Image (cartoon, rainbow, N blue to C red):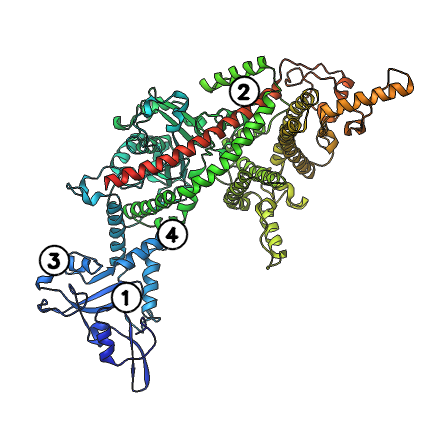
Amino acid sequence: CRDCGVFLQCKNCCLDRHTLTPLHFLEARMNGTDSFGLARRSRTSGLIYQLGHEGRRCKFPQPFVRSLTVIDTNGVHEIKYQFCACSRSDNATNLKQFLRNTWYPASFTDPDTCATFKALDTFRLLNVVANVNARDFVTTLERLTDATAKTGLRWIPDRYKAFLMMTRQWAFLQRLRRAARCHDPRGIVATKCGECMVNCWSCPFHGRNTPSDWQSVDPKYRYLFRLILAMDANFKMKNRIRAREHDDPSLGPGWGAFVEPKEYQKHLRKYISTCIAFAALTQKETRNTAGQRISGVGGVVCARHECMRPNGLGDLQKGERYANMDYILMSALADFDGKELTISYDIACQWKKNLAVRMSQLPEYLQLDLDAIDLDTGLPVWHALAHEELCATLNSLNYIPGVGRSDGEGIERLWAWLNGCSYQTKEMGLGNRADTVEDKLDAHNFLKNIGQADALRRKLIVALAERARQVEAFKEINKSIPAEKRAEWQKKIDAFTEDRNGPTPYTYTNRGGPTEAEIRASLKKREQEEAKTGQAPLHATSATAFLSAGLQLEETQRRIKAQLAVPNLTADRESKIHEYRIAFMVKLRSFRELQVVYTPGAVRMLKAEEAKREADLPAPSPEHIRLWLPSELPEHEQSGSGCQRNVAAMEAELRQGQCSNALVVMRNLLHCKRYLITFRNDNLGGQKKTTRAHTILAQLGERVDVDAHKYRDARVALTRLKGRDYAPELKELKAGDLTLEGEEERDPGEAARSDREAVKRLGRISGGTHAQPLRNDASAKKPPGVSWIWMAPGALDGGEEGLHECTCLCCSRVGILLIAENYAALRVEWSRAKARKKRWEEEVELLREEMRRILRYLQWEQDRW
């Protein structure tokens, strides 16, 4: 027996041994020679398996001996068997006898094929974990049965289609069983929409895992019961039109992750125009959707735990239209009965406009009363970088009360996991595709729930440490601000919280030339005008978007390097570095695909770089990967076949905007730093207090360094593209240009006392009264003059705010009139520091409440069963 071991037995002993294990392979050795053919029981071994008795003899078996093909994890078996007809079967039907033997039949009447429960479970696990499809699984089992399978030398029955149907039914039945639908006296037909989906244990479900008096809680703690969702589209999950299509409904339409298909299609038919210009919408013959009936999926997940919502997934026919996304979102909120809701969406700034109007066009049972709830919308942290600065600030999750440290990017991580099955679902019928995707998402939610105990514990450890750090940091900056200023700025924060369309206290108002966002908008407009003149775009993603993506990747590399430069990494910093690296690699793959179109020279450089790299050396870490933007290419590759059209010139414009942005941010940060240094030296004494102040100054210094690196990188790129004589106002940035007087770490109280004592001693010695204090400050060695950054365009215009009242040498030399009452730079930093403190405080309380909710949900589940 190949499965029991390689030892030899006589035929009779071997058959007796296998009366209970018919799904083993036997090899016969005859007359001292090897017979390599497998002894299939139905033909050569003479073994007849008895159902109802686990293989043992039955006194009254059914008279007919039948043949059966059984698919197990070790191969495809052909056996002979009999049904039981004695009292032990308890009048069980043939179907029940198969199931009691853990064999799942391919049909309910006279089946000639079965699969063992073990084989079905194994395939289901391989399918959701490793994305193994049924064809590859069956082929593997055929090769395990006989290495010469499908070569014509050996015949093995083809059971692929039968196995495909069995696995689909099996997965569906397992989901029904886990959802407790098999215990409903009305049967599974009474299943409601979304009832078979595994719910997130941590999200608030009123009546399951929230206190009974949650509605009467103090308003300042109401955010603990806020539902935070993230929505997005995924265009990897396509589905092709089949030439010979047959009806393929889902086994449980609308019972799991997908929306109810009939009502969804009925809703979408209202948005298909009869105009000739929109004929492609129904024919699906556009450049990006040719031959596809599904261009992708839209989804809604819980933003904090990355679990797909019931009925939170829907097919997209043509792009990310509001008609699709609104319906999917409201289907995911069909059972929502809370008072506070936050939606994270990468185009939330536009999507929220006219939401009430679009809501009225949805079916009545999906409409949400927007006046009865507190609805907030925000941009995911990563995607916010692609928006204009003002837009990103107005819609930043960092400034929305009640969301803690939610980043809104959880749905992107789910897409990355789900995309693995896109290759097999691309060719499936719609019903089979829906059942396959739902089973994978069911497994995803289950694993997320099981792992939440460890995940929340680790997050809480990080949150507690970071909360303490942010609270201490805010205390230091807060006590340096006059009380009347704090009250004034708090009013601005409160006004912004009430109306986020008003002026924001979290951004600088001064300008220093055209910003990167303005240049990007100008380039997009120019490309649109070129398209109107008949110049077809090279790719669906524009050249401006391509360059912006490259600059975002470069910015991520700078962030990673800045985090790694800190001597002692906290748990929060390590977590950020890990997230940055994952996000970078995900975006880099898409960027490399676009480089083939816009910068073929970069592709050649990448191949040359890979050829030079030693094979035994590890690949470079994400922060050290060369992006090969046009400015990094050799001069001969920056035009012609190396770069398409004006891509290099467009990068030069964006680089100039980067330089302007960086100068503005650095000046404002230095204004704030100058104020805090003055306050420290004038008011703080003792090692403990000055150490805390130094921590705040070090954090500001880190941010200045990041923007300094950004300026230097942008200037180097600009020089490579345009030459050294281009933009002479953008000078080389040296370390001394960012140095402030009094920046050195010292105890001002001790220094003052030392100075007074030295004055007294010198006065007694010289007999005079005008002796000056002796200091060995670093500022005394600072060369005289004013750094050029204070004279750059935008620094001295009448509209710049944020200059503090100062009598330092650099300011008095140029006679700048500094405005004390504006405090713009300090106001921004104070507001941001307070927001960070508040979000981390919320994060700690949210994590603790989520831990409690898990316990309540499991108790509710136990009581239900």
Real-space CA distance between mark 1 and mark 3, rounded to the nearest whole angstrom: 25 Å
Location of mark 3 (residue): 93
Q: Nearer the viewer, residue 823 or 332?
A: 823
Q: Amino acid at mark 3?
A: Thr
Real-space CA distance between mark 4 and mark 1, rounded to the nearest whole angstrom: 23 Å
Q: Position of residue 119 (x, y in %)?
A: 29, 59
Image point 21% across, 39% down: which residue?
A: 191
Query: Is mark 2 in CB contact (under 8 Å) with mark 3?
Result: no
In terms of sequence position, does the residue under pointer 1 or pointer 3 come before the other?
1
Location of mark 4 (residue): 129
Please tell me whether mark 4 or mark 1 is closer to you in this view.
Answer: 4
Location of mark 1 (residue): 76
* Callout 1 secondary element: strand
Q: Amino acid at mark 4?
A: Val
Q: Position of residue 13 (x, y in %)?
A: 24, 78
Real-space CA distance between mark 3 and mark 4, rounded to the nearest whole angstrom: 36 Å
Q: Quadrant of residue 555?
A: top right
Q: Amino acid at mark 1?
A: Val
